[in-house]
Structures are given as C-alpha cells and as structure tokens.
Image (cartoon, rainbow, N blue to C red):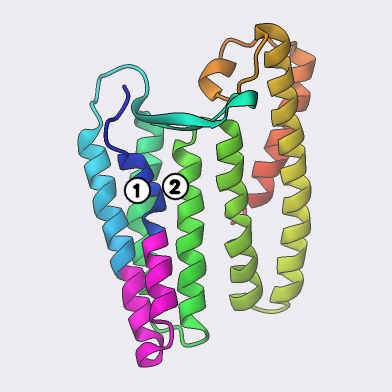
Amino acid sequence: MTSTFPLLSLLVFSPLLGVLLVLTFRDAHQGRAAQWGAVTSSLVTAILSLFVWTAFQEGTAGLQLVERFTWIGSFGIDYFLGLDGLNLFFLVATAWLQPLILLASWNMQERAWQFNLHLLLLQCGVLGCFVALDVILFYVFFELMLIPLYFLIGGWGRTQSLVAANRFFIYTVWGSLLMLVSLIYTAVLFYQSAGYWSFQITDWYQLEIPVATQVWLFLGMFLAFAIKIPL
C-alpha cells in the first residue's frame, strides 16, 4: 500500500532535527540547551512513531506506508521504504528508547553535546535500516551507523577506548565489504535471471539460488551483522 504522505521518511530523518538543534545550541548554558534540543527531537521522533503505528492497518497483507522513487535508474536502485508488522515493532521500540537513553546520560559532563549528536545520528541509521527495502539504501543506513559508533566507543569508552574503537572500525569495514560483495553478487544473479538490474528486496524474492551459493552469500552477510551483535 503506497503512502501519499512521506510518514516513514519523516520519522527516519527526524533525528536530524535534533542534530541541527545540538549544533546550534552546543555552547549555550554549558551544553544543557543542546541536551534539551536532543531530548525534544527524540520525543518528536517517538510521537511520529505513534502516528506510524496508528496508520498501520493490522490484518492487511503486504507492505504498508510504501514510499518509492527512482534513485539510480540505470541500476534499478530506488529510494524504497516500507513497513510490515515485524519492523513496525522495532521501529517504535527504537523511537521510544532514544529519549530514555538521552535522559539516562543527562549528567554526562564530558563533551555532552557531541555525545548527544552521535546518538541522534546513530538513531537515524537504525531507523533507516528497519524500513529500507532497497538493499543499497539499506547498506547506506547500515554504514551510517559505523561513524557515530566509532566516536561513541572511542570518545566515551572506558580503558583503552581508542584501541577498541580502532579494532571495531577495522572489523566492521571488513564485514561491510563482505556484505557489499554478497549484495552485488546477488544483484548480478538477479540480472542474469530477469534480464534487468534491481536491488529491491521484493524483486529478489523470486530468485532461485543454488544451496551452495546461498551458504556463501549468507556467510558474507552474517559476518557483517555478527560484528555488531555485541553492541
């Protein structure tokens, strides 16, 4: 079911409002204004998630609140968002956990505005991953999470935090490359089968892939996810 109003996009990118507020008020009132901006933005995101929840029609088959337009047409890459019952739960949970996380870290004094900035960017990436139905778009959101995570680990971790951040970065880059290779190879298989390029998950459902190839593709994608599981 295609949406006439870009509600999912509004939800996914709403944390960027908080980013702007944090950058604008980072030096005001010893950083407290930036923290209030981050919390306010996260509450806006949480409220938007309730609008998404109420707009979702239970018992209706297929994807809902779909937003889609051509991004890189020659390779079948689209800006493609959609919702089902499973990712709805994770979407709402992520939206409501964020203000709790920000409030729990309220007393942090060390570069508080930067900490809040990275948390908001991280939330944007996570929300995008839950609703992206184009694998390249999903990959972009997935990699967006890497940048704030690196700075969060390196800047606010405990003993040898910078060493841990560098190791995380190296392992994540290798995992991400394996995922990218797996995704591109799957797209090639689809092209060979259908005669045109597509990176849409909904199109890939029709692929018939040999079991041995499925195992290798699974390993490439699993390693990229497994690296982030401890987080």
> Along the horizontal axis of the image, is 184 left or right of 56?
right
Within-10-Å neighbours for mark 1: few <14, some 14–19, many 20+: many
- Percent from the top left, x then y, of residue 106? 38, 79
Task: Identify residue for label 2.
Answer: 127
- Percent from the top left, x then y, of residue 165? 71, 67
**Above or below: residue 145 compared with residue 107:** above
Of 76 and 18, nearer the camera is 76
Q: Which label number is shown at residue 11? A: 1
> Along the horizontal axis of the image, is 187 left or right of 83?
right
Residue placed at 40% from the left, 92% from the top? 30
Q: Secondary structure at mark 1?
A: helix
**Above or below: residue 225 compared with residue 167:** above
Magenta part of the chain: 16-39
Return the disc, 2 or 1, that comes first in the chain's sequence: 1
Residue placed at 58% from the left, 53% from the top? 144
Tell me the quarter of the image containing the C terminus.
Answer: bottom right
Q: Please, what is the three-letter code of the amino acid marked with disc 1? A: Leu
Q: Secondary structure at mark 2?
A: helix
- Percent from the top left, x then y, of residue 197? 65, 19
- Percent from the top left, x then y, of residue 180? 72, 37
